[in-house]
Every structure is written in structure tokens, then in C-alpha cells.
Image (cartoon, rainbow, N blue to C red):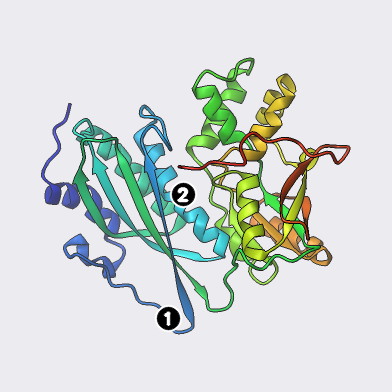
Amino acid sequence: MAKRPGEFELIAELFAPLAASYPGALDLKDDAALIETPAGQYLVATTDTLVSGVHFLPDDPPDSVARKLLRVNLSDLAAKGARPTVYLLALSMPESIDMTWLRAFAAGLAADQKEFGIALAGGDTTSTPGPLTLTVTALGEIGQGKEIRRSGARVGDSVFVSGTLGDAALALKALKGELGGLGEADRAALIARYRLPQPRLALGQALVGIATACCDVSDGLIADLGHICAASAVGAEVAAGHLPLSPAARAALGGNPDLIASIAAGGDDYELVFTAPPRRAAEVRARADDAGVAVTEIGRCVAERGVTLLDAERRPISLVAGGWRHF
């Protein structure tokens, strides 16, 4: 096991290079970063924490853990329509985390910094007797008044979702040995989606001015659409048969139709669920095409509060859990 160096040596070796492209990071030699914001812009900030054994498995590859950590935050910026700029990183590490693990973790961050045009601007490192705990605070920019909030949905709006749903929830079942009957290719496809979500930044920015409300699907479609409904004082009806599924998810569902509840309520998809007036549906699809992301209309906003999942006969489907809750 490669022994970890001291805190400042660790920062200098692994994390200062990640901050080199952002002058306001001050080479990570200060206790704060300097972030310039042009006039008329909002600085959009979001924070997410991943805990080993809760949000990722202890034996997940460290580079994929790093990339998921960054991407779940970028997904929140995508839901606002913001452009990412910098992020802050906090590591609370048990003794078992050595330099081999940390080098791979830093390499994962470097890969996604390059892909998404974001830089490290600071953070904190601590030791802990508990599980590995990782926190990113991501910052982005958007013009004032252009941000997409959760509170703009109106009765009659169409409900859309990007990409496919349920892959991450099914992957977690597969990793825990609770989902049998899948071929290796389908199993691998689900696990890849769980470990490496795709933040829909281009789509979020394309929806500015057309989406009335938006949220990323982190706690599950039903729960996160519920957040939009609560903020907007509306309800929503969702057609289970319209939920977009990957080939791997369809294979899993074919063997067990009851999995539709897990697909609708399971978390970690990091797709965007959003609302828009029906008259602008064609424009939504055109902008999504330009962003290179598929979108599917799955339901509509209604006056009666709450989110209802409906079968083909418009009968409510019972959900044991409406989505992920920490406590």
C-alpha cells in the first residue's frame, strides 16, 4: 500500500495541477478562490456529497467515483441552464485510502475537467474514522432572468425527460445480486450508466427560454418531478408506457414487469425532467436534437397535487417508495 504524504504535499502533487488553468484558484495556496462574475450574470452554485457504501460501492473504480462526483454536480447546473466554470473539492478520507487510489481519483477528475471545461478552484482535505466522504461544490454562470427554476410549471404543460430512465437503479440491483437473467452486455451497459452518468449541460442550456421548470433526476423521476410540482403548485400525470428505456432496461423489464416501479422511482439517472407548453413541443425536440440528446414527452401537469404514474388503462400504479431519501 502506497503511504499518503502530508496534506499540503498531497495538494501540491495531485490537485494543484488541476487548478492551474484557473488564475483565481491562486495555485491552491490560499484559503479561498477569487471568482469574477460579469455584470448581469448569476453565479450558480450547487453542492453534492457522495459517501462510500451509500452513493457508490467501496470497490468501485476510483476514477469512476471521481467522475460521478463531478458529474452529479454538473447535472444540477444543467437543470438551471448554466455554464460550468469552477468547482471546490472536499475529501474526508479513512486510513485505507492510499496514493494509488488517490492518483486514479485525480486522473478521473482531470479527464472530466477536460471534457466539460471546468477547473478546480480550491477545497479541503481531512481524515476521518468513518467511510470515505467526497464533496464537490460546482459553480456556473447564467444571465440574470434566464435561469430555469423549478417553480415555473403550469397546469396543461407537457412533461418531458431526457435520455433513458431506470438504468442506474437496475444496475444497483445487479451489483447487489438482486437482478438475475441479464446477459453480460446488458449488465455492463446498466453498470456503466450507474457509474458514469451524463450531465445534460448542452440540453439544459438549449432549454433556456422554452422550459418552464426543470430538475435533474437524482432521487428518481417521481420524486424529482414531485419537486417541480411542489415548487410550482401543480400536479402531474405520467404514462408508464411512455417512459424511455434503454435496451438493457427493456431486457430487465421483460423478465420482471414489476420493475417498472423501480424504474420510475429509482435514483441516479441524472437526466433532466422538465416542463414546457404543448405548443412548443416541436421546438423542444428541435433544440434537443441540436444538443444531441433524445427527449420524450411522458405526461402533463394537472391541477390535482402530487405525481401519479398511470398504466395503459390510466389506472394508478402503486409505488412502495416515491424516490430516494437519505432519512
Residue tagged by mark 2? 71
Image vertical order of residue 33 relative to residue 13, above or below: below
- Mark yes or no: residue 196 visible: yes
Residue tagged by mark 1? 38
Q: Nearer the viewer, residue 91 or 185?
A: 91
CA gap, disc 2 and disc 1: 25 Å
Q: Are marks 2 and 1 in contact (CB under 8 Å)?
A: no
Residue 308 disc label? none
Instruction: List the single residue furthest toward the top.
Output: 181
Q: Nearer the viewer, residue 237 or 290?
A: 237
Image vertical order of residue 185 relative to residue 235, above or below: above
Who's the residue at 40% across and 59% down the image? 138
Q: Nearer the viewer, residue 321 or 136?
A: 321
Quadrant where the image shows the C terminus: top left
The amino acid on which the numbered mark 2 sits, given as a three-letter code, is Arg
Q: Position of residue 190 (x, y in %)?
A: 58, 30
| Horizontal relation, residue 101 to residue 236: left or right | left
Q: Residues within 10 Å of mark 1 (few under 14, many from 20)?
A: few
Quadrant where the image shows the N terminus: top left
| Horizontal relation, residue 52 to residue 168: left or right | left
Image vertical order of residue 107 relative to residue 212, above or below: above
Q: Position of residue 201 (x, y in %)?
A: 55, 58
Secondary structure beneath dot 1 equals loop
- Mark yes or no: residue 247 visible: no
| Horizontal relation, residue 10 to residue 218: left or right | left
Q: Nearer the viewer, residue 21 or 94?
A: 94
Who's the residue at 63% across and 59% down the image? 230
The amino acid on which the numbered mark 1 sits, given as a three-letter code, is Pro
